Image: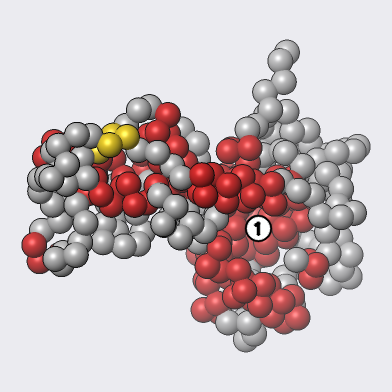
Amino acid sequence: MPLNLPTSEELVVEDAELRSILTKIAKRSAGGRAVSGRYNKHDTARLRFIRSIALPGIRFGQLVPNDDMRMLRLGPMNVLQGVDLASMDEWAQRHGRDPRSKKKDGWLDETEQATLFRWLSRNEKHLCVSNPARRGAPRAFQLDFGAYEGHRLEQLVRHSIQSGGRTHLLLAANRTASTPRPGAYVLWLASGAFEWSFPRHLHLYLMLKSMEANGAFVFPDAALSSPVAIKVSERAEQQYETHVAETLAPIAGERNPYAGGGGSGASGGARDGAQGGDAAQQPFLEY
């Protein structure tokens, strides 16, 4: 049977989704405060699994097993019912407890909460991604900033081609005299003048690279009658490669959480060749 290893693109996309889940968990626990309140058993299990197994696994080139990823993507504890609730309860029982702790449950104490909150506060601008959609569904991506917030990138490209760069996509009430036409805006996003930040702009980058690979073009404005091909800047490519290298570099002394003999660290259903095994638990406060 051929070994189907994940690509670096799949790994960094999943890394971004995992970090986005961490942010969501922190925000719904006591309003995101560092103290006064605690994470429920489901979110505690998600936190421990992401930080001790999922993120280290990404750094060793392995995607999270399908069954575990489904648990991470489920809604908060108070909305789950039926099979989802039962499955999550069982999963949380397995992954919620810190094996180094003598506490009877896996809930985070105030020190752990405060440490996590400080880490999230320092990194939040780099954790937020506009769409955690996995590879294979890039068209779901929507801009979450700027003049065209809420629009899909292909909407801008299509309007630019259909209008020949002569008209705006936005209504007059929603733009100013300096608002660029869709084609010009797309070219700016792809250029070195745009301030790239990964993983914040990860899906934007991948969508633009997909368009470039498929020979997409736009009409910047009415004054330029010839189409201009979408070309992602070398600066963006370099920053993306740096992000990939940093994301996939194991931390000194870190072990592959999916390697080794049988244990409770990783559940079955691993994707792309990842094997279940005994997870090397990383101390919660290291990150």
Q: Is residue 103 visible?
A: yes
Q: Say left or right for 243 vs 109.
A: left
113 and 221: which one is in front? 221
The residue shown at (55%, 63%) is: 126
* Horizontal and vertical percent position of residue 224: 17, 41
* 65 in relation to 78, above or below: above
* Horizontal and vertical percent position of residue 193: 41, 57
User: Which residue lies under the disc numbered 1?
Assistant: 46
Which quadrant would residue 261 be assigned to in this image? top right
Q: In what element is the residue under mark 1? A: helix
Q: Say left or right for 234 vs 215.
A: right
Q: Indicate the quadrant containing the N terminus: top left, top right, bottom left or bottom right.
A: top right
The residue shown at (51%, 79%) is: 31
Which quadrant would residue 67 be assigned to in this image? top right
In the rendered picture of this protein, how many numbered marks are placed on residues? Answer: 1
Q: Say left or right for 15 vs 48.
A: left
Circle 1 Cα neighbour tier, 10 Å, few/some/many (<14 / 14–19 / ≥20): many
The residue shown at (63%, 37%) is: 8
Q: Is residue 90 visible?
A: no
* 241 in relation to 283, above or below: above
Q: Indicate the quadrant containing the C terminus: top left, top right, bottom left or bottom right.
A: bottom right
The residue shown at (83%, 64%) is: 283
* Horizontal and vertical percent position of residue 165: 15, 43
Colour mode of the rendering: secondary structure
Which kind of residue does numbered mark 1 sit on?
A: Arg
* Horizontal and vertical percent position of residue 230: 35, 38
Residue at the top extreme? 1
* 133 in relation to 114, above or below: above
